[in-house]
Image (cartoon, rainbow, N blue to C red):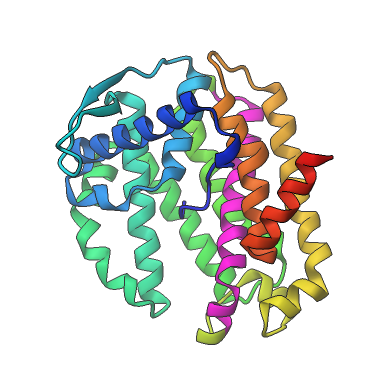
Amino acid sequence: MFGYISPDAPYLFKKDETLYKALYCGLCKSIGAGCGQMARSALTYDMAFTSALVHNIRGEDVKIERRRCAIHWIRRRPIAAVDGITIALGCVNTVLAYYKLCDDKADGDKKGVFRHLYKRGFKRAVKRFPQIGEIVSRETLRQDGLEKSGCAVVDEAADPSAKMMRDISSLVLGEYSTPYTQKLFYALGKWVYLADALDDYDKDVKKGRYNAFYNSCKINCKNAAVESCGEEWKFIFNSLFADMRECLANIKFHFNHDLTDNIILRGIPLKTRTLFYGKGCADACNKGENNE
């Protein structure tokens, strides 16, 4: 995951904002406990969202304590306690971060030089959860093959990332995994891949790197590509939103799920509009929808 998953903040309840931040801080401590201190720097709020989703589906309540941390040591803050779920998700985060930086290195991105900072944490993560390493390695190789072949079918290009998240969710959810949870995580994985491709469109074209959207239309400018192919691309995203809504209606949640509903039903579509048209236009569209 790459940091694209976020809530629609003005419509986020205060209690859910507190939970979201507590889950993030708890995962930071879990990564330190499971993968080492350096790996903590790769954490994104995407995994805090995943933690909220997995805890709720598994029916395992989050214990929140007021504690200090190394960065915010003056005042105690709400922090989710380390548990089996957060240790597992911390390992997932570390493995994904390491492979992402390896991919950056292969693409000639300067950020790739930092992959060695996570190598020790990566080794600890796959030793603790070898299946996570196997899933990510398998789908990363498949992704690499599609990109090297110049795949021009957007859905096909996003399939490895989608299956990666589906299979990881099945592993973490265990007996609570259902066809609907698998379909939800598949859609989330596909959305993250496509959001990243849309965000990096112009940069990828400039640097001659693979981009699923560019390969599907061969238009050098993102704005021109959106004008030409935007309706087709929006259909893909809207299909994912429909799948997510269907899954939410058929998944058993054990606790209040306002936080994850806000992110999936509002935050993800809002982020998509931002990536298509820019923040100002997306905010205006959001206000228009809420005034109807």
Q: Residue 58 at what x, y percent from top left? A: 48, 18
Residue 218 at x, y percent in the picture:
72, 82
> Could you tell me which residue is drawn at 19 percent across and 52 percent down?
38
Q: Residue at x 15, y 36 (%)?
A: 74
Which residue occupies the foreground of this view, 95 or 26?
26
Quarter placement of the C terminus? top right
Name the side, left or right, on which 104 lies relative to 273: left
Magenta stretch: dominant SS?
helix
User: For this rendering, which residue is in front, 286 or 180?
Assistant: 286
Tell me the quarter of the picture where residue 172 sits: top left
Residue 1 inside the magenta-drawn segment: no
Q: Position of residue 287 (x, y in %)?
A: 73, 47
Q: Is residue 157 left or right of residue 134?
A: right
| Quadrant assignment, res 242 | top right
Q: How many marks?
A: 0
7, above or below 42, in the image: above
Residue at horizontal 62%, vertical 17%? 252
Question: Is residue 118 depicted above or below 145 in this figure?
Answer: above
Q: Is residue 114 left or right of residue 192?
A: left
As for residue 198 lying within the magenta part, the answer is yes
Boundaries of the magenta span = 177-205
Q: Nearer the viewer, residue 166 or 280?
A: 280
Tell me where residue 92 appears, x and y as whole percent: 37, 43
Q: Residue at x 58, y 25 (%)?
A: 258
